[in-house]
Image: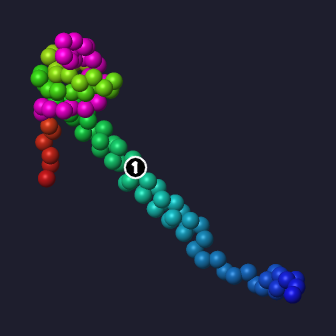
Amino acid sequence: MSLTPNVLLFLQAEPSRTGPGMSLFFLQMLAFVAIIYFLMIRPKVQQEKRHKARLAELRKGDEVVTAGGVVGKIVRLNENELTIKSEETRLVVKRDRIAEVLSGAEPEKKS
């Protein structure tokens, strides 16, 4: 069995008309970008916004975890720094290095 006649028939056939072409491609790319935005980028931005709100509402006595993993209670607050007490040690930490608020003020949830 020779494939040559089949290849010749394929080459001689009229090219089929393409459909929407580039507009379909751009529509697919737009859908891909929208999916990436709503599944990856937007949740991260919202999480950062909630974290900043929690940091702004820190109060004396709140229990926090630093980015380094130190757990302690806030004993003093300044604009950019806070002092936490962990066991018998007091540490001065930058406000933006707080990774998590374990207790204290929680931001109000909108319904």
Disc 1 marks a residue whose amino acid type is Met
Residue 111's place in the image compared with 71, above or below, is below
Label 1 crowd (10 A; few <14 / some 14-19 / many >=20): few
Q: Is residue 19 visible?
A: yes
Q: Is residue 102 magenta?
A: yes
Question: In screen coordinates, is 61 left or right of 37?
Answer: left
What residue would you read off at disc 1? 40
Whole-percent x and y of residue 8? 85, 83
Residue 83's place in the image compared with 32, above or below, is above
Residue at the farthest front position: 87
Instruction: Please name the residue shown 69% across and 82% down the image.
Output: 16
Instruction: Please name the residue shown 27% across and 23% down the image.
Output: 70
Question: In screen coordinates, is 71 left or right of 25?
Answer: left
Snapshot quadrant of residue 85: top left
Whole-percent x and y of residue 90? 21, 12
The magenta span reads: 81-105
